[in-house]
C-alpha cells in the first residue's frame, strides 16, 4: 500500500513518542522489564485464537497473491508456534540484563576511575517481511535491553502484526512501562518504511530481516545506521574422509528440518574421491523427503535424473526443498566455491580429518563456521540467547545470532575528585 501524500508530522509524532519512551525504558529496572515480558507471554497465550484468526487472513491474502511456499511457511502461526513464542519470551526473562554491566574498568595513576558500561542503543527500527514471529522476538529483546522499538513488518503479515503490536503495547502499559516503547509504521506502507530508514533524529539503529532484495534496499536507502542481516546461501562440504552416516543425517537435517529459514542448507559440495561412496545414500535420503536436486555434470553421472544446476542456482537462497549439488576436486576448490557464492551466514564441513577441519574453520569467512554439525544450529535460541533479533552477516558491532548484548552500546563513566589534566 503506497502513501504518496504521507503526512510526515503524523509518523514523526510516533517516532518522537518512541524516543521519549526510550528514555524511560533506559532507566527501567530489570524487575520492571521482566514483569512486562511476563505479561507479553501471558497475553500471547490468552489471545492465541485472535492471533490465529488474523494470521488466517494474511495467509489467505498471501496465497491469492502468489506468495512462495517458503514465505507462507514463515508467515504461518498456529497454536504450537505461538506457544513457542511465549516460551521464548519467558526464556529472555531468565537471561542476564546487560544494562549497567561493566565491560572494562581501571583506575588511572592519577586516581581517576574510568569504567566502560553497557547502555541501550535507544530506538531500534526493524524492517522485515512475512515473519510475524520477528515482531515478538525483536520487541522482547529490545525491551529487555532497555530500548524502544519501531516495527515495519510488511503488508504480508499486516493483520497478524496489528494484533501482536497490540499485545506488546497492552503488556507494557499493564506493567507500568510506556506503551509507546513499541510503535509500528505498517499503516503508512512503503512510504512509512522509507521515512523510518531516514529518521536519524529519532531512530538510533535499523535492523532489516528478510530477502536479499529487502536488505539491499534498506542498506542503499537508509540514513540511519544499519546492522545488516543476511540471506543464507549456506554450504556444506563433505570431504574425502567424511563418515557416510554423518553425511546422510547432517545433510538431510540441514536441508529438510525447516527449509524456509536462513540457516537451511542450499548448496552441497562433495570431494570427488568421496562422491561415489557418499552421494547415493545422501541423495536417496533427500529425494525420499521430496528434495529436488540441481546437480553439476559430475553429479549427474551418478544421478542422471537430477536437474542441471545453473550459475543462478549456486547464488540462490531457495527457501524450499531445492538443493544445489556439486563435486569438487579438493578442499581448495570447495573453499573457492564458498568464497564466490557465500553470503557469509553459515558454512559447515563434514570430515574426519583434523587438519581439514581446522583449515575450514580458519579460512571460511562467515558469521558461523561448523565442523560435523547441521547448519540449523545457527540460531539465537540454540545458542542460548532466547529469542534473536536476527543473524548479522556484517563485521561491525555484531556478527552472528544477535541477542541482548548486541542491542547495547557502551559509554565511558569517569569519576574524579577535582582532577585536572596536567
Image (spheres, rainbow, N blue to C red):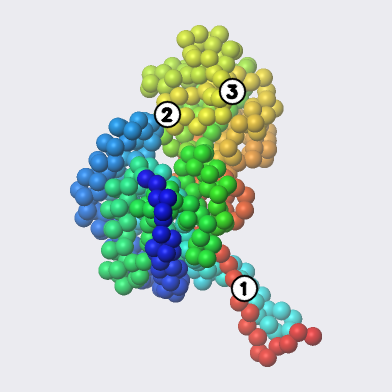
Q: Residue at x 37, y 39 (%)?
A: 74
Residue 166, position in %: x, y? 29, 58
Mark linked to residue 320:
2
Examine the rendering and report whether any part of residue 241 can be seen: no
N-term mark: 1 or 3 = 3
Residue that mark 1 sits on? 412
Residue at image location 33% in from the left, 67% down from the top: 179
Q: Which one is earlier in the sequence, the residue at label 2 or at label 3?
A: 3
The nearer-to-camera label among 1 and 3 is 3
As helix, strand or loop, the secondary structure at mark 2 comes to loop
Sequence order check, earlier mark of 2 and 1: 2
In this view, the residue in front, 138 or 370, is 138
In the picture, the disc for residue 44 is none
Q: Quadrant of the N terminus?
A: top left
Looking at the image, do the residues carrying marks 2 and 3 touch, with CB atoms under 8 Å apart? no
> Up-down: is 328 above or below 392?
above
In-image side of 299 versus 417 (left or right): left
Residue position marked by numbered label 3 in the rendering: 311
Q: CA distance from mark 1 to mark 3?
A: 49 Å
Q: Secondary structure at mark 1?
A: strand
Q: Residues within 10 Å of mark 3 (few under 14, many from 20)?
A: few
x 65%, y 33%: residue = 339
Report x, y in % for residue 73. Answer: 35, 36
Residue 394 against residue 334 in the figure, above or below: below
Q: Quadrant of the C terminus?
A: bottom right
Image marks 1 and 3: residues in contact by CB distance under 8 Å: no
Towards the viewer: 236 or 145: 145
* Rendered location of residue 104, percent (x, y): 62, 69
The answer to whether residue 118 is above or below residue 3 is: below
Whether residue 316 appears in this view of the structure is yes
Image location (x, y in percent) of residue 240: 62, 22
Amino acid at each position: 500500500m503506497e502513501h504518496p501524500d504521507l503526512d510526515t508530522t503524523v509518523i514523526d509524532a510516533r517516532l518522537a513518542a518512541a524516543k521519549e519512551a526510550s528514555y524511560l525504558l533506559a532507566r527501567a529496572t530489570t524487575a520492571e522489564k521482566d514483569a512486562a515480558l511476563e505479561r507479553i507471554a501471558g497475553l500471547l497465550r490468552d489471545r492465541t485464537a485472535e492471533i490465529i484468526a488474523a494470521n488466517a487472513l494474511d495467509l489467505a491474502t498471501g496465497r491469492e497473491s502468489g506468495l512462495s511456499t517458503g514465505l507462507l511457511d514463515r508467515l504461518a502461526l498456529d497454536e504450537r508456534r505461538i506457544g513457542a513464542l511465549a516460551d521464548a519470551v519467558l526464556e529472555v526473562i531468565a537471561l542476564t540484563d546487560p544494562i549497567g554491566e561493566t565491560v572494562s574498568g581501571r583506575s588511572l595513576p592519577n586516581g581517576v576511575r574510568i569504567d566502560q558500561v553497557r547502555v541501550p542503543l535507544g530506538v531500534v527500527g526493524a524492517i522485515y517481511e512475512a515473519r510475524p514471529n520477528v515482531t515478538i522476538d525483536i520487541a522482547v529483546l529490545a525491551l529487555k535491553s532497555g530500548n524502544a522499538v519501531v516495527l515495519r513488518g510488511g503488508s504480508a503479515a499486516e493483520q497478524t502484526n496489528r494484533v501482536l503490536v497490540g499485545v506488546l503495547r497492552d503488556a507494557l502499559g499493564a506493567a507500568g512501562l510506556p506503551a509507546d516503547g513499541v510503535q509500528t509504521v505498517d499503516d503508512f506502507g512503503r512510504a512509512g518504511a522509507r521515512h523510518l530508514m531516514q529518521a536519524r533524529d529519532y531512530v538510533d539503529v535499523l535492523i532489516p530481516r528478510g530477502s536479499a532484495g529487502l536488505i539491499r534496499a534498506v542498506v542503499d536507502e537508509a540514513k540511519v545506521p544499519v546492522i545488516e542481516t543476511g540471506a543464507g546461501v549456506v554450504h556444506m562440504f563433505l570431504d574425502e574422509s567424511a563418515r557416510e552416516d554423518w553425511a546422510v543425517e547432517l545433510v538431510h537435517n540441514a536441508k529438510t528440518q525447516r527449509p524456509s529459514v536462513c540457516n537451511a542448507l542450499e548448496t552441497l559440495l562433495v570431494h570427488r574421491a568421496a562422491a561415489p561412496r557418499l552421494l547415493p545414500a545422501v541423495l536417496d535420503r533427500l529425494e525420499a523427503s521430496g528434495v529436488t536436486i540441481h546437480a553439476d555434470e559430475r553429479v549427474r553421472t551418478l544421478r542422471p535424473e537430477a536437474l542441471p544446476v545453473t550459475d543462478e542456482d549456486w547464488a540462490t537462497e531457495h527457501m524450499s526443498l531445492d538443493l544445489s549439488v556439486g563435486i569438487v576436486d579438493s578442499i581448495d576448490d570447495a573453499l573457492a566455491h564458498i568464497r564466490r557464492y557465500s553470503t557469509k551466514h553459515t558454512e559447515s564441513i563434514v570430515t574426519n580429518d583434523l587438519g581439514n577441519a581446522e583449515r575450514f574453520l580458519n579460512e571460511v569467512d562467515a558469521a558461523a563456521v561448523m565442523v560435523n554439525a547441521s547448519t540449523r544450529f545457527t540460531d539465537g535460541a540454540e545458542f542460548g540467547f532466547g529469542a534473536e533479533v536476527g543473524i548479522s552477516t556484517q563485521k561491525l558491532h555484531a556478527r552472528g545470532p544477535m541477542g541482548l548484548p548486541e542491542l547495547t552500546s557502551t559509554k565511558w563513566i569517569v569519576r574524579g575528585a577535582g582532577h585536572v589534566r596536567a
